[in-house]
Every structure is written in C-alpha cells, then in structure tokens.
Image (cartoon, rainbow, N blue to C red):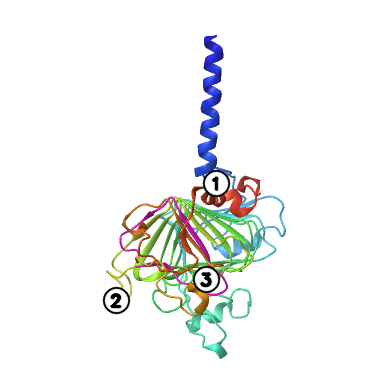
Amino acid sequence: MRNSMKNMMMTLCSLLFCTIVNVEAACPKKWQTDLKADLVVAQDGSGDYTTLQAAINAAPDHSEKRFVIYIRNGKYDTEKLIIPKNKINITLKGEDRERTIISYHIYDCKSPDTGNKCPAESWALWKDNSELVRTSATLTIMADGCRMENLTLENTAGPVGQALALTVCGDKQVFRNCNILGYQDTIYLWTSGKRSYFENCLVLGRTDYIYGGGIGYFQSCEIRSWGGGWITAPSTLKEQKYGFVFNQCNFTYVDNSPRPGDDGRPVAIGRPWHNYPKVAILNSVMCEQMHPEGWPTTWNMEYASTSEDLHLYEYNNTGKGADMSRRAKWAGIRKLTAAEAREYTCEKVFGEKIKDWK
C-alpha cells in the first residue's frame, strides 16, 4: 500500500512538473554544445587557419552534417565575414565568450551611387561581392542551420549610421552564450519567416538595434540599451503570426554612451518600421529607464496606432519599466492573457522543436 501511494505521488509530481514546464519554459537549455571541431582558427598559426573567412570557405558545401569551426582566443578584426548560402550547418564556436572577439568597423554600406559612407579602404576589400555588401554587418549569414556559441561579435563604428554586427538571411539559426554588440542596427533579422534563436546572449545597442521582418526568439538574454533610442524596429508581414519574442529576459540600461546626450534619456521598446510589427515581451525584467509609452512614435506608419494587426504585447513582466498604465493608446498594444501567453513558447513560435534542428 505504501509503495502504491509513493508511486502515485511520484506520478502526480511528474505531471505537475511537466505542466509547469510546458507553460513557462521556452526552449531546451542544453543541446549539442560539446561538438568536436572540424577546423581550428588561431591567429598564432597553431590551428588550421589564421583567418575566419578562410575556414568558412573550407567548409564543405551543402553539408548534411554539422561542421564545427573552433576559434581560439584573439581579436579577429581584419575581415567582413559572410557564410554563403551553400555553407549550411556551420557552427562558429569560440574558446572564451569575452576573449574570442569577431570585430569590424563598417557602416552605411551602399553603392557609391546611393550615398555610400563606408571607409574607402575597407570598401575596396570586398566591393565585388554583392552578397557581402548588402548590409554593413560584421557577419552576414546567408546559409541555413548556422550556429554561433561562446564568443563576442561586434561592430565598433559607433554612432555614425547603420553599423550592423549581425545580418541573418537564412533559417534555423542558433546563438548561444554570445555578446552581440553595436550602436545602431546591431542585429538585422532580414528575411520574413526565417527563424533565429538567441539564448543567454547579451545584445547591446541604442537605435533600432534588433530589427527586420524575421522571427527572433530571445530566451534568457540581457537586452542592454544606451539612452535616447529604440530597442526594436520590426517589419513583420501581416500574415506572419510572430515577430520578435523576448522570454525571461533582462532589459537593462547603461550610461557612457559613445554619443553625447544619450545618457539619462529613456529607451523605447521600439518603433514600427514597415508592414505590421509584432513584438512580445514575457516574464522579463524591465528597467526603470524604459519609456512609459513603450512605443512613443508611429514613425513613418500612420496606421500604426489604429491597426489591430500590429501585435505589441506584454505579459507577466516586472521592474519599474513594466508598468503598462501609461503605454501608448494604440489598438495593438495590450497585455496578454495567460492562455494567450502559452502560445509564445519556442515550439509554438517556430512551429517545431529546436532539438529537431540539425
């Protein structure tokens, strides 16, 4: 009898635990992190390559197996990088998150005929690669199935215009335990419907520093802002259910901005860029410097305040910036119900389990 009761209690506890996890958790915390390296990059010549682009180029085309490039500590700041469409399933894994640094300084990269502001000497290095010059990103990912772990990716150009650290065009991207740093347009999730997952990452910026039409899920990340700007600039298609989702994140604020006049000014959740923006913030901590309106400007979208096709949602957040009583009175800004919040798990947003990604 005692054993039967014990087994019954264990079963009930297991069911209760699973219920809680299914409601609150988003994505698995550990998966395929201890992969053996296929190539090693080291600046001192102790690896297979001394530069990152050479290692990326050496990866097999259209590989069904994951190809791991291990990057030893150092500051890799001489290349503007691209992972082409044919280099699928690549992992860039750093030796140390703070000491493995991929860095570049490019900004406002366009054709010279349309007002290119890139430093001329840098433009000359890669102007013939049309894919590479599409944005000013330090790293552009065109391929599907790429991962980045345990490193810092940055654009150091500062407050000079568009200066991206990361542009993502492919699908099923994963970024774990990374610092992604910039000032304006730090992360560009370019392609509508394409999915990117960020876990335990630090994202830093000031102006529209998470933007685009893709689907981004930020789990347990620090979203760190300089003052006076906007965190997001979404451009979600009307028929796309999800845009940017932040779950169990910490929205923080930092002084000593590279731009004079930023310090002390509030930071907005975002401003609508194009189409029908969708942003959801759940179970997160929001700093007191958050602009009380959340979305203080319609920017270039007159219908932003009246359309219910904009989904700018919040749920179960804490901190002084989480008070929604003074949020902008837009049709699409509201608090989710508990039932609605359950539709924002990682599996629901992506339409499949991340563990099923190769």
Residue 153: x, y in percent?
47, 62
Residue at which label 1 appears: 27
Residue at which label 3 appears: 137
Residue 314: x, y in percent?
45, 57
- Residue sitting at the far top: 1
Residue at which label 2 appears: 260
Question: SS for tag 1?
Answer: loop
Residue 11: x, y in percent?
56, 24
Question: SS for tag 3?
Answer: loop
Looking at the picture, tell me which residue is in the foreground, 201 or 148: 201
Q: Quadrant of residue 195?
A: bottom right
Q: Nearer the viewer, mark 2 or mark 3?
A: 2
Q: Residues within 10 Å of mark 2 (few under 14, many from 20)?
A: few
Magenta region: 267-290
Disc number at residue 77? none
> Was residue 213 drawn as part of the magenta stretch in this picture?
no
> Was residue 289 drawn as part of the magenta stretch in this picture?
yes
Q: Residues within 10 Å of mark 3 (few under 14, many from 20)?
A: many
